[in-house]
Amino acid sequence: MRLVRRQRCRAAARPFGGMALLLAVLSLSACASDPGSVVYPPPGAAHRVGSPGLELFWRCGWPKPQVLRVEGWAINRGFVGEVRNLRFELVGVDMRGGTVSATKSPTVDRLGLMRSEPFVLDVRTHGTEARFDLYYEYIFHEPGDDTFDSGDARQHIGPGVQVASSHSIMLAQVPSRFLVWNVCDEALHRVK
């Protein structure tokens, strides 16, 4: 009985088999050409950390003498919503905890749901660094939270208060800041 069902399914699927294959190939090629898409976890990434709304994957290398490169991907897996004003800072720290070398990335204005953004940080080292720390900060919007960009500002100001403008009001938000301590340590933050 089971064999007969398989034959019937195959016979029914034949007219659409070529079309299904064509659609699968087209959708895969569209994903591959999308600059915001990335294979999860990204190939070659040795390290990983997660924070609300964002996951970081990266690898460390020395492209030139005295230049440390941290190259990776920030991925918004869609747990909290859109990420805004994403910034990275790579800091070389000496034995006393003082900053010896540092570099910053350009700001990523928006990182939408289920999107990724590559980042590269090159820092010129001075030879006295004991470790390298990665700071990253961003503002995230939780689904259902209408304080991020609201069309009706009166609900945020209070009952009975009239607003002179009908435009949306962006309320001031402080970015969340995170630290990845000793970012290139081979024993820490490993991708599993």
Image: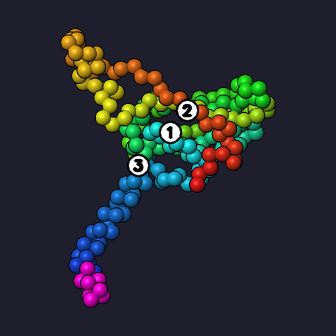
Lower position in the chain sequence, tag 2 or tag 1: 1
CB under 8 Å between callouts 2 and 1? yes
Residues packed near mark 1 inside 10 Å, few (<14), some (14 to 19) or many (20 plus) = few
Q: Amino acid at mark 3?
A: Asp
Q: Which residue is mark 1?
A: 51
Q: Amino acid at mark 1?
A: Ser
- Image quadrant of residue 53? top left
Q: Main secondary structure of the magenta part?
A: helix
Lower position in the chain sequence, tag 2 or tag 3: 3
Spatial CA span between label 3 and label 1: 25 Å
Q: Which residue is mark 3?
A: 34
| Residue 7 among magenta residues | yes
| Secondary structure state at the residue bearing disc 2 | strand
Lower position in the chain sequence, tag 3 or tag 1: 3
Identified at 77% across, 26% down, the residue is 96
| Secondary structure state at the residue bearing disc 1 | strand
Residues packed near mark 3 inside 10 Å, few (<14), some (14 to 19) or many (20 plus) = few
The colour scheme of the drawn protein is rainbow
Relative to residue 70, is residue 56 drawn left or right?
A: left
Q: Which residue is mark 2?
A: 178
Q: In x, y percent, where is residue 3?
A: 30, 88
Q: In x, y percent, where is residue 140?
A: 42, 32
| Residue 49 among magenta residues | no
In the depicted structure, whether residue 46 falls above or below residue 172: below
Spatial CA span between label 2 and label 3: 28 Å
Please give the range of residues in magenta.
1-9
Q: Residue furthest front?
A: 159
Q: Amino acid at mark 2?
A: Phe
Q: In x, y percent, where is residue 169?
A: 30, 19
Q: Inspect this view and state whether residue 47 appears.
A: yes
Spatial CA span between label 2 and label 1: 8 Å
- Image quadrant of residue 79? top left
